[in-house]
Image (tube, coloured by chain):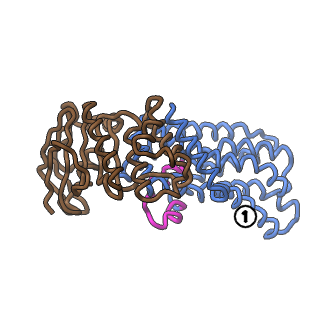
Chain colours: A brown, B blue
C-alpha cells in the first residue's frame, strides 16, 4: 500500500539519507530507529508530503503521492514535535476542532478523549497542560477521524508508562483495522512484529 | 464545509479570548486618528479636506499591522500542519482565516468609521459613501495582505518586510477608495469607483487564496 523507492533527502545542503526502500502492507508497522539527526523526522515529513524528495518516489496503492498531494494528506495523521495546541482553547475545544477538520464521525470526540484518559481535563485550557498532557492531547488527535496512515515522530517523549500503554493499544487497534503506522522511536514505544528501518548517523 | 466553519469559528474564538490583542487594529485606528486634529489644528476646513484620505491611510496601516497574526501563530505552534491535513483544500482554509481576520479588523473599522469621520468634520453624505467604500475595500486589504503574511512566515523582522511587500499593492485601493468619496461629494457620483473596488474584491477573492496557499505550502518544506 505505502511504498518508498530509492528515496533520498537533502537538508541544508547535506545528504541526510539515500536509497531508502520499503513497502508496507495492510496493518504493518514500520519503526524508524537511529541516532538524533539521522533523518527519521525528515523521512516522516517526506511521507506526509511536507518535504519533496530529491530522488525517488513514495507510492500509495501504486500511485506517486505527489500526483495528488491534497488527497494524500487527507489519508494521514501526523504527530510531530510542534503540537499545535492552542493555549486559549480547552482540551475539548482543541480536539473538537481536529474532529471538524478531519470530518470525523459523531462520537469520535468522546472516543478520542477516552482513549488517552483526557476526560478529566476536558475543560482545562491548553496553557495549563503539562508537557505529558500536551503529548496525550496531540496523540488523541489520532482517534479524531479514521485515517489509514499514522505518522508518529517520537510519540513516546514525555509519556508516563500508563499513557505509553494506551498509545501501544491505539497502534494495535489501528493495525487491526488495516491501517499503516510509521513511527520514529528510541525504543520507548514497543510494538510487536514491527518492521525496523535502521538509520546510520 | 464543516471544516471551513470550524476554522472560522476557532479563529474568532481565539480572537475574542485574546482580548486587547485582537482590538489592536481598532485601538491604533482611533488613537492615530485623534492625533490629526492635534497635529494640523482644529480648523474645520482643513480637517474636512484631509479627513477621507487620513481615514483610508490609517485603515490601510491598521489592517497591515494586524497581518502578522494571520498565519504566524499557526506556523509557530504546528497548527498549520494540522490545517494542511484537513479535509479542506488549503485555499479554502486561507479564505476562512481571511474572513475571520476581516471580521475582527476591517469590519470593525468600517463600523467605527462614521464616528471617527464626524471627529474630522465630515458631512453626512461623505460618511455614508466612505463607509461603503471601506466595506468594499478592507476585505481586499486582508486578502492581498494574506499573500504577504504567508510569504513572510518565519522571517524575522517580518513587520518591516511586510510593509515593503504589501503597501505598494494597497495603492490602487487607496486611490479608488478616496476618489469614490471625493467624486460623490463633488456631485459626480462615486459609483464608478465603487464598482472598481467591488471588482477588485471579486478578483482578490478568486486569486489571493491560491497565491497565499502556495506560499503556505512552501513554508512547510
Provide the chain ID for the residue under circle 1: B
Q: Nearest the camera: A194 or B164? A: A194
Q: Is residue B154 highlighted in magenta?
A: yes
What is the secondary structure assignment of the residue under circle 1? helix
Q: In the rendered image, which residue does mark 1 sit on?
A: B32
Residue B204 screen position, x and y as percent: 54, 41
Where is residue B50, by image quadrant?
A: bottom right
Q: Is residue B57 left or right of residue B72?
A: right
- Tell me: A133 left or right of A170: right
The residue nearer to you, when weighing B85 against A32, is A32
Residue, x 51% and y 47% (percent of image)? Answer: A120
Residue positioned 83% across, 62% down in the render: B46
Circle 1 residues within 10 Å: few <14, some 14–19, many ≥20? some
Q: B159 or B170: nearer the eye?
A: B159
Give residue A3's position: percent from left, percent from top.
17, 38
Q: Do we see residue A42 in this rendering? A: no
Is A117 a magenta residue? no
> How far from the left and from the top, in percent, is residue B140?
59, 45
Let me know if residue B34 appears in the view.
yes
Residue sitting at x 25%, y 51% = A189
| Residue A140 image position (x, y, % from top left) | 40, 44
The residue depicted at 36 percent of the width and 36 percent of the height is A74
Which stretch appears magenta?
B144-163
Amino acid at each position: 500500500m505505502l511504498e518508498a523507492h530509492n528515496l533520498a533527502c537533502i537538508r541544508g545542503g547535506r545528504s541526510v539519507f539515500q536509497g531508502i526502500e520499503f513497502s508496507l502492507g495492510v496493518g504493518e508497522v514500520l519503526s524508524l530507529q537511529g541516532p538524533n539527526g539521522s533523518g527519521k523526522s525528515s523521512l516522516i515529513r517526506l511521507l506526509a508530503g511536507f518535504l519533496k524528495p530529491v530522488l525517488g518516489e513514495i507510492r500509495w496503492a501504486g500511485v506517486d503521492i505527489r500526483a495528488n498531494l491534497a488527497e494524500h494528506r487527507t489519508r494521514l495523521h501526523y504527530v510531530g514535535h510542534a503540537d499545535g495546541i492552542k493555549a486559549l482553547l480547552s482540551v475539548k475545544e482543541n480536539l473538537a476542532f481536529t474532529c471538524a477538520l478531519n470530518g470525523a464521525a459523531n462520537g469520535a470526540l468522546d472516543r478520542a478523549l477516552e482513549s488517552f484518559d483526557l476526560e478529566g481535563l476536558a475543560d482545562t485550557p491548553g496553557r495549563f497542560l503539562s508537557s505529558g498532557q500536551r503529548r496525550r492531547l496531540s496523540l488523541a488527535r489520532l482517534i479524531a477521524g479514521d485515517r489509514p496512515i499514522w505518522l508518529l515522530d517520537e510519540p513516546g517523549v514525555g509519556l508516563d508508562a500508563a499513557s505509553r500503554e494506551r498509545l501501544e493499544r491505539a497502534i494495535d487497534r489501528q493495525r487491526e483495522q488495516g491501517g499503516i503506522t510509521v513511527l520514529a522511536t528510541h525504543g520507548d514505544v514497543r510494538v510487536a512484529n514491527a518492521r525496523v528501518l535502521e538509520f546510520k548517523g | 464545509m464543516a471544516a471551513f466553519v470550524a476554522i472560522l469559528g476557532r479563529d474568532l474564538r481565539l480572537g475574542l479570548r485574546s482580548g486587547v490583542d485582537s482590538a489592536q487594529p481598532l485601538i491604533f485606528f482611533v488613537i492615530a486618528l485623534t492625533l490629526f486634529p492635534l497635529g494640523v489644528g482644529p480648523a474645520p476646513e482643513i480637517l474636512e479636506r484631509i479627513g477621507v484620505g487620513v481615514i483610508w491611510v490609517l485603515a490601510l496601516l491598521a489592517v497591515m499591522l494586524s497581518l502578522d497574526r494571520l498565519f504566524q501563530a499557526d506556523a509557530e505552534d504546528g497548527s498549520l500542519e494540522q490545517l494542511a491535513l484537513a479535509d479542506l483544500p488549503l485555499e479554502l482554509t486561507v479564505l476562512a482565516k481571511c474572513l475571520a481576520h476581516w471580521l475582527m479588523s476591517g469590519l470593525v473599522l468600517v463600523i467605527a468609521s462614521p464616528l471617527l469621520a464626524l471627529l474630522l468634520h465630515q458631512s453626512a453624505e461623505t460618511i455614508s459613501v466612505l463607509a461603503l467604500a471601506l466595506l468594499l475595500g478592507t476585505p481586499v486589504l486582508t486578502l492581498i495582505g494574506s499573500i504577504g503574511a504567508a510569504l513572510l512566515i518565519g522571517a524575522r523582522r517580518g513587520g518591516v518586510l511586510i510593509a515593503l511587500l504589501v503597501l505598494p499593492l494597497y495603492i490602487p485601493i487607496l486611490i479608488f477608495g478616496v476618489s469614490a468619496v471625493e467624486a460623490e461629494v463633488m456631485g459626480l457620483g462615486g459609483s464608478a469607483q465603487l464598482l472598481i473596488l467591488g471588482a477588485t474584491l471579486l478578483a482578490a477573492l478568486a486569486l489571493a487564496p491560491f497565491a497565499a496557499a502556495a506560499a503556505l505550502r512552501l513554508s512547510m518544506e
